[in-house]
Image (spheres, rainbow, N blue to C red):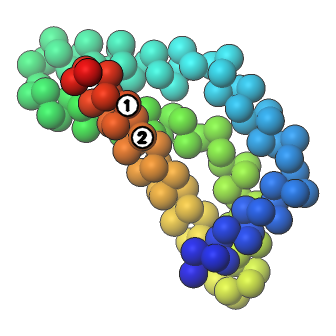
Amino acid sequence: MMKLYGNAYKFILKKDFMLLIIVFVLIFFTSFIWFGVPVFIISGWMFKLEFPVYIQLIVVSLSVGILLSLYFVPFNIKVAKKVAEIKQQSTKSRFIRIQSSFVLLFTMIFVVFIIFVFLI
């Protein structure tokens, strides 16, 4: 199953490598959006409303994951079309699965980063 997605990503990377370069350039130049808004604005708002720390960590991490995964939407749509074509399923369901995986992946990376920064 994962080999199918890996092959689809490899095919799309070979075909549209420039799209990946554009994504990383956008991530670098707009880091104030995907990092600054959740970390400074959302966490500040939640701190004023006196939410527990673990709820703040979950909400901020999920918002970073959602905002960061939005940069990969064009890439994920192409992969979803390729996989849906092979499996003869709807592109929408494949895209939702891929995008939610990206959200969880970026959320977990952010949580590990925060734990690493604040515990060391």
Q: Residue 11 lies in what quarter of the image? A: bottom right
Can you see residue 93? Answer: yes
What residue is shown at x 26% (from left), y 13% (from top)?
A: 44
Q: Residue furthest bottom?
A: 88
Dot 1: within a 10 Å radius of its alpha carbon, few (fewer than 14), some, or many (20 or more) residues? few
Q: Is residue 87 left or right of residue 115?
A: right
Q: Is residue 2 left or right of residue 9?
A: left
Q: Which residue is mark 1?
A: 113
Q: Are marks 2 and 1 in contact (CB under 8 Å)?
A: yes
What residue is shown at x 73% (from left), y 71% (from top)?
A: 7
Q: CA distance from mark 2 to mark 1?
A: 6 Å
What residue is shown at x 68% (from left), y 17% (from top)?
A: 29
Kind of residue sitting beneath label 1: Phe
Can you see residue 91? Answer: no
Residue 117, position as x, y percentages in the image: 32, 22
The C terminus sits in image quarter: top left
Task: From the viewer's side, name the closer residue of 41 and 8.
Answer: 8
Residue 43, position as x, y percentages in the image: 27, 19
Image vertical order of residue 17 relative to residue 6, above or below: above
Kind of residue sitting beneath label 2: Ile
Q: Which residue is mark 2?
A: 109
Please tell me whether mark 2 sits on a helix, a strand or a loop. helix
Image vertical order of residue 74 relative to residue 117, above or below: below
Image vertical order of residue 86 relative to residue 43, above or below: below
Residue 2, position as x, y percentages in the image: 58, 74
Count of numbered marks: 2
Please tell me whether mark 1 sits on a helix, a strand or a loop. helix
The N terminus sits in image quarter: bottom right
Task: From the viewer's side, name the closer residue of 80 and 18.
Answer: 18
Task: From the viewer's side, name the closer residue of 55 and 111.
Answer: 111
What residue is shown at x 25% (from left), y 38% (from top)?
A: 58
